[in-house]
Structures are given as structure tokens and as C-alpha cells.
Image (tube, rainbow, N blue to C red):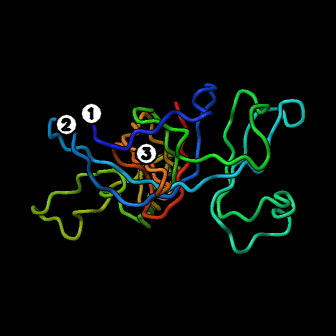
Amino acid sequence: MVTSLQVRPSEVDILGMPKFLIGKKNIMTRQFAADGKQIPVTVVEATPCVVVALRSKDKNGYEAVQLGSGAGKRTAKSVAGQFKDLGKFTAVHEFRVEAVKDYQLGQKLDVTQFVVGDKVKVVGVSKGKGFQGVVKRHGFHGSPASHGHKDQLRMPGSIGAGGVQRVFKGLRMAGRMGADKTSVLNLEVVAIKPELNQIWLKGAVPGAIRSKLFIESL
């Protein structure tokens, strides 16, 4: 068992309600289990989020809770008008729920709703790699380095037959790589640190340092 700060299940957990938060990727580090096994963990900083909007099935066609996170300095007037007196936020995200009647506008959710051992889904944007060739982007082996080949090692080769007179859709070629919405499932919560607004997850999460993450219980 990983040595960590044990937290009593919050009111959200007792009621069996879904758990979700908006966080920010901090650093990767490691934990040691009782048997000495090393466990890689990602530290996610998740300041308390505020419920800024509720979506009901009668009015919107679906049930969801909209959370706001971070203290924003500038907010468009159209967005600020929706939040009214709730504040300004740097990140806003909706989470689907079964019933919104369990939530109120202005309610705050923090890391204490999670407990050690919970399985969560983390959604983020992967690191952008820019324009990359087929070897890095698709794992092509490349051409032989000898026997008459010159400057051909990392080239894609033929992109189609001459008789067709066109390139088929979906052909793997060079192009933009990374910066895609990525979901990672079944990450385990190994530690909760309310005094630091941190949740420690086993394994890696998508995105660069300080990138936004959306955490949701499974």
C-alpha cells in the first residue's frame, strides 16, 4: 500500500455522486510502496472549482454541471454575464451527471471528494510536436541506407500507383503531430493532499506541464 495522506470520504462520495474536477498538470515524481516497489505518479494541482451553471434535461436536453476553475484576470463580457457574481475563471468545463438537483450554483468542489484507490479518467491535450515526417509520425522504417540510396532514408516512398492518377484519402503522410484531445482511463488515485490542493495519480497523463486536465471518476 502506498504511504499517503488518508482523507475521509467527502459528502459527495457518501451520496454516491460522480466526482469531477478541473486541474493543472504539475510534475511527475514517484512513490514507494511498503514492499519498496517504485510507483510513478503525476502530481495534479486542482484548486477548488465553482459550479457556475447547471444544465437540466427539461431546459437543455441533457443533465450536466459546468465548473469554473482558476482566477481569471480578463473575461469576455458575454461570458462574465453568465457567471454573474461567481467570479472570473481561466477554465470552464461541463461534466455530464445523472441529476443536477444535487448541485447548487456557487457550490465548491475540491480534491477531498476523491479517496485513495479511486479510478479516474483524465482528459487533456497531448504535447504538440509540430510538422513531422512519416518516420516519427507513423513509425515508418525508412529506406535502406546503402545500395544506391541517396537522401532517401526518411522519405515516405511511393504515394500511389500511376494509373489511378490520384492519391487515396487517408494515406499516411507527413503532417502536424500532437496537440490532440487525449483521454487516459483507469488511473489510480494514490494520494490526496488537501492543504496543497493536489491529487496524485499513478502513471502519466497527457499534456505539458501546467496544461489543463479534466478529471472524472469512473
| Place of residue 22 in the rendered image (x, y in percent of width and height, measured from the top left) | 58, 51
Residue 161 makes an appearance in the image: no
Q: Quadrant of residue 81?
A: bottom right
| Place of residue 51 in the rendered image (x, y in percent of width and height, measured from the top left) | 73, 48
Instruction: For mark 1, give the secondary structure.
Output: loop
Pick the front one: 191 or 157? 191
User: As drawn, which residue projects farthest toward the bottom?
Assistant: 73
* Kind of residue at badge 3: Ile
Q: Quadrant of residue 75?
A: bottom right
Instruction: For mark 3, give the secondary structure.
Output: strand
Quickly name the residue at label 1.
1
* Kind of residue at badge 2: Ala
User: As drawn, which residue projects farthest toward the left?
Assistant: 147
- Residue at 30% in and 57% down: 135
Q: What whole-number distance in Å separates the C-alpha atoms at marks 3 and 2? A: 18 Å
Crowding at dot 2, Cα within 10 Å, few <14 / some 14-19 / many 20+, comes out as: few
Nearest to N terminus: mark 3 or mark 2: 2
Instruction: For mark 2, give the secondary structure.
Output: loop
Nearest to N terminus: mark 3 or mark 1: 1
Q: What whole-number distance in Å separates the C-alpha atoms at marks 3 and 1? A: 14 Å
